[in-house]
Amino acid sequence: MIEVSGLRKVYQDRGREVVALGGVDLRVRKGEIFGVLGQSGAGKSTLLRCVNLLERPTAGTVAVAGQDLTALGEKDLRAARRRIGMIHQHFALLSSRTVAGNVAFPLEVMKVGKAERTRRVAELLELVGLADKAGAHPGQLSGGQKQRVGIARALAGNPAVLLSDEATSALDPGTTQSILALLKRLNRELGLTILLITHEMSVVKAICDSAAIMRDGLIQESGTIPELIARPGSRLTAELFPLPEPEPGTVTITFTGQADEPVVSQMVRKFDVDVNILGGALEEVAGVSAGRLRLRLTGDERAAALTYLADRGLLVQEA
Ligand SMILES: Nc1ncnc2c1ncn2[C@@H]1O[C@H](COP(=O)(O)OP(=O)(O)OP(=O)(O)O)[C@@H](O)[C@H]1O
């Protein structure tokens, strides 16, 4: 749904070149929620703004729904952008307009007739759970309600893609969870593809199917969550399941989806080994239970036992 290739963005800042994106490739599949994680300055906002060409890339291409946006002229680009909604950290609402007026705004720009506009605004407010706030002004709303208005407005043009720029960073944890649940519901019910940027691992954990980690304008790793968890040396895994540096002789096993199977106890029954559990972390990620376990394994059949675990699909790393 979104294909980014060789994306570079170089800013000129007081005679100095700042490489915000140093050659980024990214593929977001139709219907998935894709999270881009990274610290401040990693280039996340620049990447997101290049996806709808709010920012012109210095080099590279961006295709959305099979259309190369970088090749379009201004008029065609404006039309293509209507299929790409965007929500912002600080909501970006018009304070002088009511909630309904904010949601109607993009429809007015699209020259949708009044009757259809009224119908559509009511439908969108219902969708985000704000039907009773149509006449309120943004100043009378909580942060979570403001973001719901932002989401309703972003969906006005029936977009295939929603871009989310730190949409929950200004919200408290409870409100964050309700906004993430709303995004997940819209993703499921409307088949909406969502590309979000965040510096919070908890956002990725809550709703993302795939993720990428950015640093210094480059993607460090990218893939579906189960792929990333199963990849040796994954930074995402290390951050999701923090364990202390392994001591020599210890074994770390990483698993996704096999948490319900008693793999370790089966291994102990099958092989002549003793197991000491030194530490572990288990999380529900993208609806799948996943985790890491640090073990000390001793006994004559240690090697065979480790092979058994690997054969069962677990990632086995020996320190
Ligand atoms: N308009 C600009 N002019 C000059 N440099 C810029 C501009 N916009 C961004 N940068 C620089 O590009 C780099 C990437 O910035 P960007 O905002 O994309 O990062 P980010 O990961 O989104 O960080 P944050 O979470 O703090 O917004 C930074 O070094 C930033 O200072």
Image (spheres, rainbow, N blue to C red):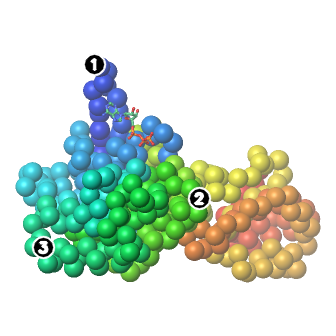
Which of the 4 image quarters holds residue 295?
bottom right
Q: Does 256 sit above or below residue 13?
A: below
Q: Is residue 73 left or right of residue 269?
A: left
Q: Is residue 222 visible?
A: no
Q: Nearer the viewer, residue 145 or 168?
A: 145
Q: Say which amino acid is labelled 3.
A: Lys
Q: Nearer the viewer, residue 48 or 28?
A: 48
SS of the residue under disc 2:
helix
Structural crowding at the residue carrying mark 3, measured as other residues with C-alpha within 10 Å and reported as few (<14), some (14–19) or many (≥20) = few
Q: Nearer the viewer, residue 292 or 39?
A: 39
Q: How far is disc 1 from disc 2 in space, using C-alphas? A: 41 Å
Query: Closer to the N terminus: mark 3 or mark 1?
Result: 1
Q: Nearer the viewer, residue 41 or 108?
A: 108
To which residue does mark 2 refer? 173
Whether pointer 1 and pointer 2 mark residues with C-beta atoms closer than 8 Å, the reply is: no
Q: Say which amino acid is labelled 1.
A: Gly
Q: Is residue 171 left or right of residue 3?
A: right
Q: How far is disc 3 from disc 1 in space, using C-alphas? A: 49 Å
Query: Closer to the N terminus: mark 1 or mark 2?
Result: 1
Q: Say which amino acid is labelled 2.
A: Pro
To which residue does mark 3 refer? 114
Give the quarter the ligand 1 occupies. Answer: top left
To which residue does mark 1 refer? 15
Task: Pick out the residue farthest to the top.
Answer: 15
Q: Is residue 142 visible?
A: yes
Structural crowding at the residue carrying mark 2, measured as other residues with C-alpha within 10 Å and reported as few (<14), some (14–19) or many (≥20) = few
Image coordinates for residue 36, horizontal then vertical, percent = 45, 53
Q: Give the number of the mark in front: 2 or 3.
A: 3
Q: Give the number of the mark in front: 1 or 2.
A: 2
Q: Indicate yes or no: mark 3 CB to ligand 1 under 8 Å.
A: no
Image coordinates for residue 272, horizontal then vertical, percent = 91, 73
